[in-house]
Amino acid sequence: MPPRTETPSLPFDGPVAAPPHDPFPSRAPWADRPRLSRQCRAILDQLRQGPTSNRDLSGLALKYTGRLSDLRRAGYRIGIHSQDHVTGEVIYVLLGEPDGGDARFPR
């Protein structure tokens, strides 16, 4: 049998199409954004009341850092107000909402 000189085409050869959805959901209109989980809503409510320690947040969700990441991904600006390297206490503060509002100055 003679050797093949041509490589058969594969089903995935060709141009790669762009993903059908927006990879940045925080840029999507509010109605199209995914809903926040119960734990995210609880943490957000706590942060809206004022600066909150990691001890308080761990009472709401054991993996509170993951929920903070979810909130940041949803467009909330969350910062660190203070951090004690000796005790490990971190104080988080809500700096802004996804609509561009400043959480420090409620309307």
Image (cartoon, rainbow, N blue to C red):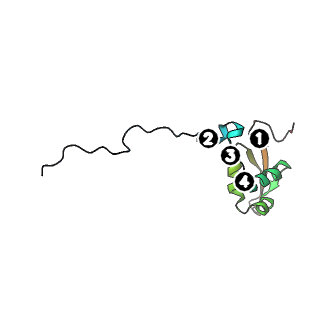
Q: Secondary structure at mark 4?
A: loop
Does residue 100 sit above or below 90 in this rendering?
above
Pointer 3 or 1: first along the chain: 3
Name the residue located 71 percent from the left edge and 52 percent from the top edge.
68
Name the residue located 22 percent from the left edge and 43 percent from the top edge.
6
Name the residue located 67 percent from the left edge and 56 percent from the top edge.
66
Instruction: Name the one closer to the observer, 21 or 104.
Output: 21
Q: CA distance from mark 3 to mark 2?
A: 11 Å
Q: Amino acid at mark 4?
A: Ser
Q: Amino acid at mark 3?
A: Pro
Q: Which mark is residue 37?
A: 4
Whether residue 47 sits left or right of residue 14 in the image: it is: right
The part of the image, by quadrant, that contains residue 7 is top left
Pointer 1 or 2: first along the chain: 2
Name the residue located 15 percent from the left edge and 49 percent from the top edge.
3
Instruction: Name the one closer to the observer, 3 or 57.
Output: 3
Q: Amino acid at mark 2?
A: Phe
Tell me, yes or no, whether the two marked residues, 4 and 3, touch with CB atoms within 8 Å. no
x%, y% of residue 44?
78, 50
Q: Secondary structure at mark 1?
A: loop
Pointer 1 or 4: first along the chain: 4
Q: CA distance from mark 3 to mark 1?
A: 15 Å
Q: Which mark is residue 97?
A: 1
Q: CA distance from mark 2 to mark 4?
A: 18 Å
Q: Amino acid at mark 1?
A: Glu
Tell me, yes or no, whether the two marked residues, 1 and 4, touch with CB atoms within 8 Å. no
Q: Which mark is residue 34?
A: 3
Tell me, yes or no, whether the two marked residues, 3 and 2, touch with CB atoms within 8 Å. no
Q: Classify mark 3: residues with Cα within 10 Å, few (<14), some (14-19) or many (20+).
A: few
Q: Secondary structure at mark 3?
A: loop
